[in-house]
Amino acid sequence: MSKSTSSPSLKTARGLGSAKEGTDHWWMQRLSAIAMMILAPLMILLVITLIGEDYATAATKIGSPFWGGVAILFVCASFYHAHLGLQVVIEDYIGNHAARLATLLVLRGVLIVLGLIAALSVLRLMLA
């Protein structure tokens, strides 16, 4: 019987063992997907009702409490869901630890900045 090099103790020593975070990540992806399943059709409905409308009408409708709230929740859920999905891809396909960490930090920063721009744009319409 030959000894396997992938024994649990060797994986742990090399830092390849379970990170104990997979279940939480999986659940967060599912919850954000459920939120997107609810919010995406509402956003599609909003966009369809705004076809052919002028800027003032669109700004008024998006600035309403209901549609503004839906838009902000959609932005938050979609950017969070994108972060979770892209994080898995980066962790799976970038082998170099430093490059993986740098890519994850850039990804997080870009998504936070873009998400804030989108959410603040909706808030500006709501407060105008």
Image (cartoon, rainbow, N blue to C red):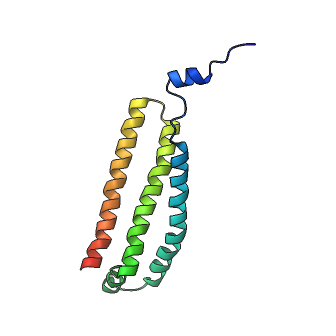
Q: Position of residue 35 (x, y in %)?
A: 51, 65
Q: Is residue 55 left or right of residue 47?
A: left
Q: How many numbered marks have been drawn onto this rendered protein structure?
A: 0
Q: Quadrant of the N terminus?
A: top right
Quarter-of-image position of residue 118: bottom left
Q: Position of residue 59 (x, y in %)?
A: 32, 81
Residue that appears at 46% across and 84% down: 49
Q: Is residue 122 left or right of residue 42?
A: left
Q: Position of residue 5 (x, y in %)?
A: 62, 18
Q: Is residue 23 left or right of residue 120?
A: right
Residue that appears at 50% across and 60% down: 32
Q: Is residue 73 above or below residue 18?
A: below
Q: Position of residue 76 (x, y in %)?
A: 40, 62
Residue that appears at 47% across and 74% down: 43
Quarter-of-image position of residue 55: bottom left
Q: Quadrant of the C terminus?
A: bottom left
Q: Is residue 9 above or below residue 80?
A: above
